[in-house]
Image: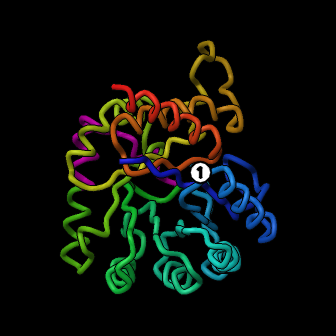
Amino acid sequence: MTTLVMGVVNVTPDSFSDGGRWFTPGAAVAHGMSLLEQGADILDVGGESTRPGADRPIREEELHRVIPVIRELSRAGARVSVDTMRASVAAQALEAGASIVNDVSGGLADPEMARVVAATGVPFVVMHWRGHSDTMQGHAFYDNVVPDVCRALSERVGDLCDRGVGQDQLIVDPGFGFAKLAEHNWSLLAHLDALQSLGLPVLVGTSRKAFLGAIGVPKGGAPRPPAERDAATAATTVIAALAGVWGVRVHDVASSIDALHVVAAVEAVR
C-alpha cells in the first residue's frame, strides 16, 4: 500500500507552523495548488488553529475562512479534506466540494458530527482527543500511552458505529502533540504497529510538532522553529511508511514525497 500525503492548508492567522502566511483565500488557494504540484494526494483545509493555547474562532468566521478555499481547490480538481470540529462547517464544506472530514476531536466536540458523516458516507478521520487547545496539555497523563490511546480510539470507533457511521468510513489518528508530552509522541511513533492492529487506516500527523524541534538541540537550548523541522518530519514519514500507514499529514509536501520515494526504492529490491 502506498502511503498518501495530505498537505496542510492553514487558513488561520495564528497557526503555529506558518503564523498566518496563507490566511487570505487567494494565498491559501495558491498554496494549495503549490502543494498539489509537489505531489500532495489530499489537501487538508482548516480554519481553526489547534496549537496549544489557541482560542476558537466563531462558527461564522470559520466558514468565512474555509468555504471559498475549499470551493476553489475542489473546482481545480483537488481531493479536499476539511479540518473542523463543527458539524455545520463540515456539512457546508462537503457541499462546497470537500470529500473527507478530518475532526481532531473525533466527533466529541460536536455531537452532530456523527450524523453528518453517517448521512454523507464520506471518510472520517477520528483523532485521539482530550479537550480543546486551551486545556488539552493539562490532560497529558497516561498509565501507558500506547494501549491507552488504542483503547480510547477503539471506544470512539465503537460509539461512532453505534451512531450510524460505517466502519469502512473511519481513519484513526493517534493525535501527536494533542494532550501528549514528547515522550508520549515518541512512544506512539515507535509503536505504530499497535495502532495498525485496530484494523483501520491510520493517519500520522507529526509535521513540525514541538517534539521534533527539540531533536539535536543541547539540553536547555531553544527548540528549532517550526519551519526548520521539515527534515525531522520527513524522517517520521519514513517511519510511518515502513509501518504501512494510510497517510501522513504534512506542511512541506516535497520532502515527504522524496522520503516516500526512498522507501519505495528500498522496498522494490527487498
Residue depicted at 66% across the width and 79% down the height: 75
Secondary structure of the residue carrying tag 1 is loop
Q: Position of residue 7 (x, y in %)?
A: 59, 54
In the rendered image, the quadrant that contains the C terminus is top left
Above or below, comparing residue 9 to residue 229 in the picture: below
- Furthest-front residue in this view: 269
Percent of width and height locating residue 133: 53, 55
Q: Along the line of sight, which residue is nearer the eye, 256 or 127?
A: 256
Mark 1 closeness class: few <14, some 14–19, many ≥20 residues within 10 Å: some
Q: Residue at x 45, y 60 (%)?
A: 104
Give the residues in magenta.
Answer: 134-153
Looking at this rendering, what residue extends furthest in the top direction? 218
Which residue is identified by label 1? 51
Q: Is residue 110 above or below residue 138?
A: below
Q: How would you classify the magenta stretch by its main secondary structure?
A: helix
**Residue closer to the observer: 161 or 44:** 44
Picture quarter containing residue 269?
top left
Q: Nearer the viewer, residue 218 or 167?
A: 167
